[in-house]
Image (tube, helix red, strand yellow):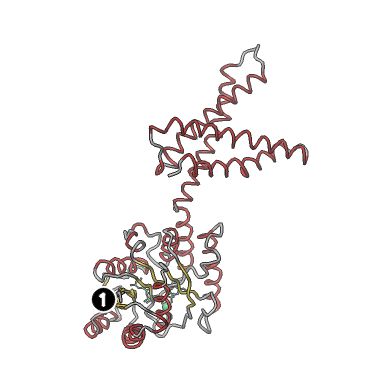
Amino acid sequence: MKQNTQTAVIVIPTYNEAGNIGKMIDYLNETTFPYIEKKNEGLTADWVMKILVVDANSPDGTGKIVQEKSKKYSNTYLLTETTKDGLGAAYFKGFKYAMKELAADFVFEFDADFQHPPETLPSMLKAMEDGYDYVIGSRKIKGGEEPEGRDFMRMLMTEAGGFVARFILFFPFKHFWDVTDPTTGLKVTRVKGFIDQMSFDFDRLYSRKFGYKVQLLLETLNMGAKFKEVPLKFKNRSAGESKFESDTTTEILLSCFKSRWFDPFIQKFLKFGIVGGFGFVVNTLGAKIFKNIFITPESNLSLLNGLCNAAAAELAIISNFIWNNLWTFSKEKIDPSKLLPKFLTFNLSSVITGIIIPSTVIAILTSLFGDQLFLYQIIAIFGLTIPLNWFVYNKIIWKK
Ligand code: GDD
Ligand code: MN
């Protein structure tokens, strides 16, 4: 039979977890790992389980305890930070180390304080064996739960924060329903194709603290990870204090917002909007300028207006084409040899999406509902021209 050995590294960031970390390392090594080794819960692979504690140089001696344990268990490692640097930064350091030094195939995000029951790990490994790339522990799905006696404010923060986070991260509802717990701290990610494709440059973190998790969540999903949620029975902290600060919720929501704002898709759409808006200015202003230049006392005004608008519209089309090519779709920039045919296609499609279709619809609306030109124009521009252009640009003109 083919041997199937996989290495999973459980990354555990710690700050002042002296009351928990020793017990946690013992529990994982004495109870959880042997259970996994016996291939319980339908596991089939030979799992090599490792623990990597990333300690923020805790003053309470957490690091010392881990060091002692690493003498006892050869699969247990300690990475010491110079100072408390935030949860996100700790995971970045841990992932890099797990990949480079510990030959990780999978990396877990895991808390030291027993709020994440180690009993959840086998089912997450099973999902990885089944081909998932990203498995998330959720408190919100069937079988998951919040600890008893949670204080009302924290509960409200989780509920409202989770909802708003999902709304910002996933609008218009992509993954809104299938990611139920966006701020959960329990996850496992496949290294190949995902963790090994990420940059672990700290500067790119919108938040070095708890907010990192929504950023990584969105990035991993955008990389096309096949993901699933498993129920997480979130417990009360077994000892010590939470590092959740009063500004943590704001910080997470800000990270959601930034993750979305700097998302390549949104950036592209914003640029497309700006270029389109500029085109509109070129069109209206251009027509005025042409008119001022060419008008004489003998001018046929209707012919002049028509011609001036046509010339200015063409200028706007040229402007749109140039700026979209250089800026919006800079990554899909058209090969110089194809510039002319693409420009002609662009021109034709602009006439269709910008004049023929909206004008026809405006005419039909007028005959159906009466004379409301301005309203119909707004409907036509936002409901037809903009979405149609977006579609044509992406699927035809700048298709990669
Ligand atoms: N190295 C390092 N540096 N570790 C840290 C830091 C830091 O700056 N901040 C926190 N940790 C460690 C803690 O010692 C603990 O092991 C783990 O990260 C989680 O921190 P907690 O303080 O226990 O967080 P929490 O219980 O309030 O929050 C949990 O639930 C949230 C969802 O409500 C965590 O699982 C969060 O990740 C999760 O978002
Ligand atoms: Mn905790």
Task: Return the residue nearer the eye: 341 or 88.
Answer: 341
Q: Is residue 35 left or right of residue 285?
A: left
Q: Which residue extends farthest left?
A: 71
Residue ID for mark 1: 78
Q: Which residue extends farthest top?
A: 298
Q: Position of residue 380 (x, y in %)?
A: 65, 40
Residue at the location (57% across, 44% down)?
Answer: 387
Residue at the location (36% across, 57% down)?
Answer: 204
Residue at the location (53% across, 38% down)?
Answer: 276
- Position of 375 relative to 307 (above/below): below
- Position of 135 relative to 273 (above/below): below
- Position of 29 relative to 189 (above/below): below
Find out if the beta carbon at label 1 lies less than 8 Å from the nearest ligand 1 atom: no
Residue 53 visible at all: no
For the image shown, how many numbered marks are present on the structure?
1
- Position of 350 relative to 305 (above/below): below
